[in-house]
Structures are given as C-alpha cells and as structure tokens.
Amino acid sequence: MAELPERDFEVIVIGSGCAGAVAAYVAASAGKSVLVIERGNFAGAKNMTGGRIYSHSLKKVFPDFEQEAPLERKITHERIAMLNSDSEMTIDFTSPVLAEEGKDSYSVLRGPFDQWLAEKAESAGAEYIYGIAVEELLKDESGAVIGVRAGEDEISANVVILAEGCNPILSEKCLGNPRPKASQMAVGIKQVFELPASTIEDRFLCPEGEGAAMLFVGDCTHGSVGGGFLYTNKESISLGLVATISIAEDGSRNEVPVYQMLEDFKNHPAVAPIIRGGKLVEHSGHMVPEGGYNMVPQYVFDGCLVAGETAGLCMNMGYQVRGMDFAVASGQFAGEAAVAALDAGDTSAAGLASYKQKMEGSFVMKDLQTFSKWPHVMEEWDSMFNDYPTMVAEIFNAMFSVDGQPQQPLMKRMMPIVKKRGLFKLGGEVRKAVKAL
Ligand SMILES: Cc1cc2nc3c(=O)[nH]c(=O)nc-3n(C[C@H](O)[C@H](O)[C@H](O)COP(=O)(O)OP(=O)(O)OC[C@H]3O[C@@H](n4cnc5c(N)ncnc54)[C@H](O)[C@@H]3O)c2cc1C
C-alpha cells in the first residue's frame, strides 16, 4: 500500500447540507479524521427545501432515523392540483402503501433536520468550523486537490468532498465544471405558517401525526414554467413555488416577480382557506437545479469528489420533487469512496473511482438517466401551465353546473372545449410527456 502524504485532515467536507453531513458521518464513522467547513453560522442556516424527504437512502445510513431525526409528519396524502385564476381541480390520493417501510417519506424543516445531521457527523468524530466559506480548492503541481483555503487559513487534506449545494461556485472556479445554464435552474420561494396540529389534520383529513404533500400547476406561476408546493409539518405548513428563470424561445419572459407570484398564490381560493389563521414565521428563497441528467458535471477528480446538488442531483417531475434522497445517497457513496481510497493509499481519481461506480450502479444516476428528457419537455410545454388548467376548469364547469336550461349530452358539452385546443396537438403533447416520464 502506498504512503499518503501527511495532511491536516484525511477528509475535508465543504458544506453541511444533506450530502456533506452524510459524507462526513460515513468517513468519521470509519475512523478517518474529518473536517467539515460550513459557511452558515449553524447547519441548515442557509438551506431550504419544500420539503419532503423520501426515506430510503436516509435509512441506509441511519437505520433508526425514524426515532432520532426531527421529522415533521409521515406523508400519507398526495395531492396534485391544477389552478386557473379562480378554480382548482385536485387529485387527492391516500394509501397505506405510501407509509410502507422503504417507500415512506416525511416532511422536514431544514433548520432542525440539518442540525441533527451535523450532530450525527460530530458525534461520529467529525470536526466542524461554522461561519466561514471555503474560497478556493488548493492543488499540487499535478493539479490534484490537496486542501482548501477558507479566509486566511489553508488546510490540507488527502480527499476533499465538495458539497456546496446548487450554486457550484467552487466546482466551476476550481474544478473547471460548467456553469449551469439559466434553462437548467429555477428559483424557489417559500413561507412557513404556524397552525395547530389538529387544524392541519382537519384541513387535510389526515390521522394524527400523518400529513399531506401537495403540488400545484397553472396559475400559481402566472402560467410560466414551474409550480407550487405545500407540505404539512407538525404544527406548520410550508408553502411556496418554484419558477423558471429562463427566457422563452420567442424572447418573452414572465414579468411577474416571484414574490408577487407567491402573494397571489396565497390569496388563491384553493390556498387561502388552507393557511387561514396561520402565523407567518419563516420566509426563504433558494435556487433549484432542474436540468436533470444533462447537467451532471464531472464528479470524480484527483483528490476530490463532488456530491449532492453540486453534482446536479435533483429531479422535479411535476408530481414529485427529489433532491434530498439523492444528496444523502451521494454523500454516503462519497464518504465510502474516500474511506476506500484512503485505506488503499490512492486518492487519485482512479483511487476514488468507486464513487462513480456506486453512483452509476444505484438509483441516483439510473433515475436521472431514465427521466433525462423530462426537463426539456417540461420547459417547452407551455400549455401545461396555461391552456390545460383553463381547459380543465371549463370542462368541470360544464360538467357540474346546472342552470335549469335543457342540458346537452356530456360529450357534446366537452368536445368543443377540447377541440378549441386542437385534439391532435393535445394528444401529441400528452404522448410526448408520457414518454419522458
Ligand atoms: C424550493 C425548493 C423545494 C425543494 N423541495 C424538495 C423536496 O420536497 N424534496 C427533496 O428531496 N428535495 C427538495 N429540494 C431540493 C433539496 O433541497 C436539495 O436537493 C438538497 O438540499 C441538496 O442537498 P445538498 O447537500 O447537495 O445541498 P444543500 O442542502 O444546499 O447544502 C449545501 C451546503 O453547503 C454550504 N456551502 C455552500 N458554499 C459553501 C462554501 N463555499 N463554504 C462552506 N460551505 C458552503 C451551504 O451553506 C449549505 O449548508 C427543494 C429545493 C428547493 C430550493
């Protein structure tokens, strides 16, 4: 086994989000000396999610997470809503399958959740520095990463795990990875409203301790690409939206600022009654990578691994948003690969290659690849955000309104509404979307 050069730490982790904290926990649990540098004053200070975490990857690292982690509610109710300016059509689904072990998911608030993850890493032996940002990755003459510069300090390490989140500044500046395109990024905005637990359970028809996740499409983003989200926490509701920042092919862009979209969304008749009486206790904004597989950069380098959203690991499927389960799994794989490379005395890209094998052999790269066409389909599918919600409102208005006038058969009422949008166009669009999903 080759001798590795003496460094300040065997592993330095940049960022204590889901990916970084898990990588630190795994490496420290294997007895490696680990330093985590987190620019926030505490873990989670700067992090944001909708959000709900699918538990499968968390359970692999922390088998007892359900007893230990600050989880809000087990999500057993799924709702998908289409909004017109004054109407709502919602699919509301609940099933015991959603609560089955391995398929279960939980709403979380990133402040307490990230602090719990950091505590796990610290109790496994990782050291933490808070409140300082890494500004540069240090390299040797061959270009291998050998440490970091944070403020005045230069700290060396055999392996650096870069988990700086969705704005990959160090990845771009020091590793030469491309800056994500505007079309691959969206902006998220969220508010949290406090409400009594029983009010939340009544409003969502949930048993005690269980909760709902809700995704919205249509008027919440004023018809531009994106959507709204709502997650029930123990005693609060997380409400927000994600909207594109890209300019349409015809050069147009939605001129409504995202904070105004959120104000209008809160006043929508489908949303206002849900948050009625809630006390606003938190407001946050964050970018979201939405490019999927096509924005995954190089993530194994000599002396360095890239994990979580810095590696582009996030999927917004419209009916499902995933980033945290990818971040946790990639953090685990990065931690394990760092340990294996240190044990083998080879921290070059070749020595760290097991990270790539684990990523490619798991759901992480497989899911991103399977749905690689979806971000592009969604980006171009204008009618999903404009025409469809209006069409759905017209269909259901025609179906449910009774005004005493002699009624036409249902099909005769529906067909003009659907034909207005072009039957073939509609069929083609739906076929294309279904193929990408
Ligand atoms: C509006 C919104 C809704 C979402 N909803 C969901 C959802 O419901 N479910 C889901 O699974 N995912 C969701 N996501 C995505 C999910 O939040 C991310 O995929 C996940 O947080 C990524 O984890 P990460 O560890 O890669 O990055 P982060 O959690 O962002 O952590 C990065 C960390 O690095 C630190 N950092 C950055 N730069 C430096 C530096 N130079 N030096 C030191 N520290 C640094 C940051 O402070 C931060 O703590 C959502 C995201 C948004 C924005």
Image: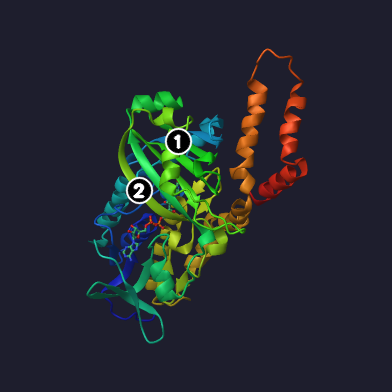
Query: Which sits earlier in the primary sequence, circle 2 or circle 1?
Result: 1
Q: Is residue 127 left or right of residue 326?
A: left
Give residue 204's position: percent from left, percent from top.
Answer: 45, 27
* Position of 182 relative to 436 (above/below): below
Q: For the residue carrying disc 2, how many other residues have a C-alpha within 10 Å: few (<14), some (14-19), or many (20+)? A: some
Give residue 304's position: percent from left, percent from top.
Answer: 40, 72
Judge whether residue 411 can be spotted in this image: yes
Q: Is residue 112 left or right of residue 225?
A: left
Whether tag 2 and tag 1 are in contact, CB under 8 A, the answer is: no
In the displayed orientation, state which residue is furthest to the top.
404
Give residue 51's position: percent from left, percent from top.
Answer: 42, 44
Quadrant of ligand 1: it is bottom left
Identified at 49% across, 56% down, the residue is 245
Q: For the residue carrying disc 1, how many other residues have a C-alpha within 10 Å: few (<14), some (14-19), or many (20+)? A: many
Tell me where residue 287 sits by quadrant. Answer: bottom left
* Position of 163 relative to 207 (above/below): below
Judge whether residue 54 can be spotted in this image: no
Tell me where residue 260 sits by quadrant. Answer: top left
Q: In this orientation, which residue lies closer to the viewer: 111 or 13?
A: 111
Give residue 331's position: percent from left, percent from top.
Answer: 41, 59
Q: What residue is pinned by disc 2?
A: 284
Residue type at the position of mark 2: Ser
Q: In this orientation, which residue lies closer to the viewer: 106 or 99?
A: 106
Q: What residue is pinned by disc 1?
A: 75
